[in-house]
């Protein structure tokens, strides 16, 4: 087999301030065997003009413009257009290191991996933060089987929930589409994709720059955040049926997402859409009460929450203090 082709899929919507940096990083890759697919998801700012400008400079860029259908359908369209041996998703407000595709492809071929991911920076306006707390010193590469990879995803440890920043063997995820019209689409998709991968490779080197934006859709709390609970619920059922060894961990993740939504939704309860979402959340929690009681009875946080709001509040403060202490171990680079 010669050098495999990598399809780089870039959904874009109203990112005129960021897309040049994204496209420049993609076009400067050290690995030359790529096709670049940019899906303009009905942008209303200058994003479309910038995409056309880059296509004029780089004829190898393929573009497709559609009416605004959200990120899921933009990614799905990119997958339908892709012809590469591997797929790589990048969000249009992020950017990537010059060598990322080359390193991921090399690892995939060397270890016969169906998915390989590098690490990433949280990219703020004045600093980069790399969460290297789960990595052991001098261990820059790790190979996992399907079950091990699923455990890392469920616990949100070495494998995060994002579809981006990972090199996927196309034939393994072909036909696996993101849910149309849903926010937090990765929570519906990533576990199914990993379940199809026999071998997963991890590079403990930050190669992807995940831009932190105060104006991002996911950062603004709304009734659409209930989609995250729906995604976690489907993942919980999937884990119970296919990877039962992680049922308790996934039950905890689902419970935490319900608790977070309930707490964050309180100030917006007067909004009709939010009120409906709160009601659905309460109904779901009631229907899962017995399962949570069975799965989470050994979790201190769950037990305290059941006994006393004050105990739960105190323990929450303790957890936040621990997390702030652990966060000091993150590497920070000023820019």
Image (spheres, rainbow, N blue to C red):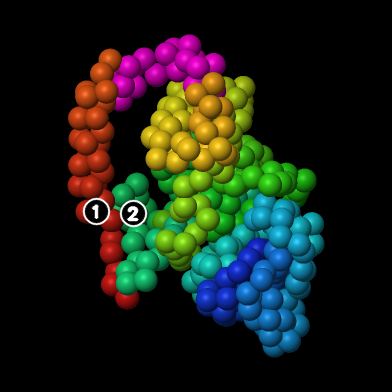
Which comes sooner in the sequence, label 2 or label 1? 2
Main secondary-structure element of the magenta-colored stretch: helix
In the image, is 181 to the left or to the right of 161? right
Whole-angstrom CA distance, mark 2 to mark 1, is 8 Å
The residue at the point 47 percent across, 15 percent down is 289
- Which residue has dot 1 on it? 329
Residue 22 is marked as: none
- Which residue has dot 2 on it? 132
Q: Is residue 288 visible?
A: no
- Labelled pair 2, 1 in contact (Cβ < 8 Å): yes
Closest to the observer, 54 or 283: 283
Closest to the observer, 163 or 93: 93
- The percent position of residue 1, horizontal first and vertical second, equals 74, 62
Image quadrant in which you'd find residue 31: bottom right
In the image, is 212 to the left or to the right of 284? left
Q: What stretch is highlighted in magenta?
A: 284-306
- The percent position of residue 229, horizontal first and vertical second, equals 53, 34
Q: 10 Å neighbourhood of mark 1: few (<14), some, or many (≥20)?
A: few
The residue at the point 20 percent across, 42 percent down is 321
Q: How many marks?
A: 2
Q: Is 89 drawn above or below residue 315 in the view shown?
A: below
Q: Is 292 drawn above or below residue 136 in the view shown?
A: above
Q: Does dot 2 land on a helix, a strand or a loop? A: loop
Is residue 80 found inside the magenta-colored segment of the image?
A: no
- The percent position of residue 197, horizontal first and vertical second, equals 63, 42
- The percent position of residue 326, horizontal first and vertical second, equals 24, 47
The residue at the point 71 percent across, 46 percent down is 180
Q: Does dot 1 land on a helix, a strand or a loop? A: loop
The residue at the point 75 percent across, 72 percent down is 63
Q: Is 228 drawn above or below residue 13 in the view shown?
A: above
Image quadrant in which you'd find residue 166: bottom right
């Amino acid at each position: 087999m010669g050098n495999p082709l990598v399809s780089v899929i870039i959904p874009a919507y109203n990112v005129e301030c960021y897309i040049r940096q994204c496209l420049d990083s993609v076009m400067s890759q050290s690995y030359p065997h790529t096709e670049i697919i940019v899906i303009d998801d009905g942008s209303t700012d200058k994003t479309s003009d910038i995409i056309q400008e880059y296509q004029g400079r780089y004829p190898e860029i393929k573009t497709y413009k559609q009416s605004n259908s959200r990120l899921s359908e933009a990614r799905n369209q990119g997958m339908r257009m892709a012809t590469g041996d591997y797929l790589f998703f990048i969000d249009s407000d992020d950017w990537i290191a010059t060598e990322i595709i080359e390193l991921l492809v090399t690892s995939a071929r060397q270890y016969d991996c169906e998915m390989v991911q590098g690490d990433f920076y949280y990219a703020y306006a004045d600093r980069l933060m790399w969460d290297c707390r789960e990595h052991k010193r001098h261990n820059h590469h790790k190979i996992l089987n399907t079950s091990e990879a699923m455990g890392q995803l469920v616990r949100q440890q070495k494998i995060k929930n994002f579809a981006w920043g990972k090199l996927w063997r196309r034939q393994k995820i072909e036909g696996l589409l993101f849910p149309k019209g849903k926010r937090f689409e990765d929570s519906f998709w990533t576990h199914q994709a990993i379940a199809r991968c026999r071998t997963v490779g991890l590079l403990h080197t930050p190669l992807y720059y995940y831009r932190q934006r105060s104006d991002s859709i996911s950062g603004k709390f709304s009734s659409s955040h209930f989609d995250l609970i729906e995604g976690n619920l489907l993942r919980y059922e999937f884990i119970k049926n296919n990877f039962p060894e992680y049922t308790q961990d996934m039950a905890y993740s689902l419970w935490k997402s319900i608790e977070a939504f309930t707490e964050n939704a309180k100030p917006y309860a007067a909004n009709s859409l939010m009120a409906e979402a709160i009601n659905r959340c309460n109904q779901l929690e009631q229907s899962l009460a017995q399962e949570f009681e069975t799965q989470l009875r050994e979790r201190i946080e769950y037990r305290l929450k059941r006994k006393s709001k004050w105990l739960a509040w105190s323990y929450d403060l303790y957890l936040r203090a621990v997390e702030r202490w652990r966060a000091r171990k993150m590497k920070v680079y000023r820019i």
